[in-house]
Amino acid sequence: MRVLAAMSGGVDSAVAAARLVAAGHEVTGVHLALSKNPASYRSGARGCCSLEDSHDARRVADKLDIPFYVWDLAEEFHEAVVEDFVAEYRAGRTPNPCLRCNEKIKFAAVLDRGIALGFDAVATGHYADLRRAADGTVTLHRAADQAKDQSYVLGMLNQRQLARCLFPLFDVEKPLVREEARALGFGVAKKPDSHDICFIADGDTQGFLARHLDDAPGDIVDASGRVLGAHRGTHRYTVGQRKGLDLRVPAPTGEPRYVLSIEPVTRTVVVGARDELAVSVLRGIRPTWTGEPVTGPWRGRAQYRAHGAPHDATVESVADGLVVALDEPASGVAPGQTVVVYEGDRVVGSAVIAEAGR
């Protein structure tokens, strides 16, 4: 099989490529140059697409004796991920840019280009399990390493995309991946995992947003509408935030206040007690399905953060999306996040949270 191996420069994608070579596939490595920000090319940048990373990926490819290329997808990435990130915060929502990158870049632009070039599949170092049935149907499941499982950030993939994907690390835990890398002589064996948002090189999300969005002052109020303070822009806040509110009126009980909702049209930030954050019903839009759409209410599990715990829930497909009724209330759920729904350990589909309530 001709396989295009996406190589970020990290240990996971390096070992994934090595496993494919060992399995006898015809492997070509590709590193995605995604950033238009010169700061991301400095040594020590916190993301996964720096110049330093591309050199690490090339050294692994040389050791594996496979062809290696760098694809410049900076324009596509900026439009689909960076601009979307800024627009979502402008609208008072909290997006997940890594999930959007998977949806629009790694498993759309890269996959389409790879297929056009004659590759049979695209492989990555994601921790997730693909299972192929006799009829050719592919299902997506959680990885063996539950601590590293990344099925959540792949939850938006459809059947056409899954059929062309390979995730060689589905059955291994992270410490063993590093051991494999050491045994193969890869210099990335001890390389730290990438973290934070790759296009924000210094990790300062608030600073990034301040440079891209103009201040629009407004009020910070409680649920009754009483003004408690002022803010410089709703993009500086997210649901569940406690620090940095700078309120002029203390709570009668002395308890801390949290951001409950953000209303960018009226430029209002609503705050309240921690227990007011609890929600039981998530309403999602733009649903995606890993297989055939599921109709009618069904029992499953819902996850709304990449590394969050799943919640038992009743899931129902409606005309404009999904309604997820959680068995137990959850806190800190923000519009713009993605809810991924599971049946057991199998990913069924996903939707973007438009509203969360009681």
Image: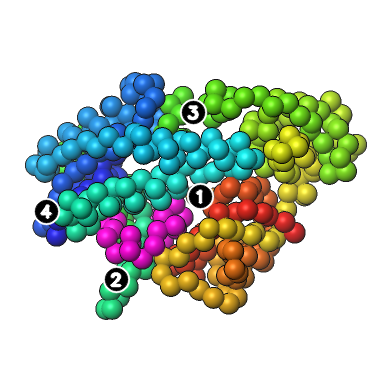
- Tell me the quarter of the image containing the C terminus: bottom right
- Residue 69: horizontal and vertical position, in percent? 18, 38
Q: Amino acid at mark 2?
A: Arg
Give the residue at x 46% y 29%.
200
Residue behind mark 4: 26
Residue behind mark 3: 203
Marks 3 and 2, how far apart in space?
A: 39 Å
Q: Amino acid at mark 3?
A: Gly
Q: Secondary structure at mark 1?
A: loop
State whether residue 151 appears in this view: no
- Residue 221: horizontal and vertical position, in percent? 82, 36
Q: Quadrant of residue 46?
A: top left
User: Over which residues does the magenta segment extend?
Assistant: 141-167
Seen from this angle, which residue lies furthest right?
A: 252
- Residue 139: horizontal and vertical position, in percent? 37, 68
Q: Contact, CB < 8 Å: mark 3 with mark 4?
A: no
Residue behind mark 2: 132
Residue behind mark 1: 307
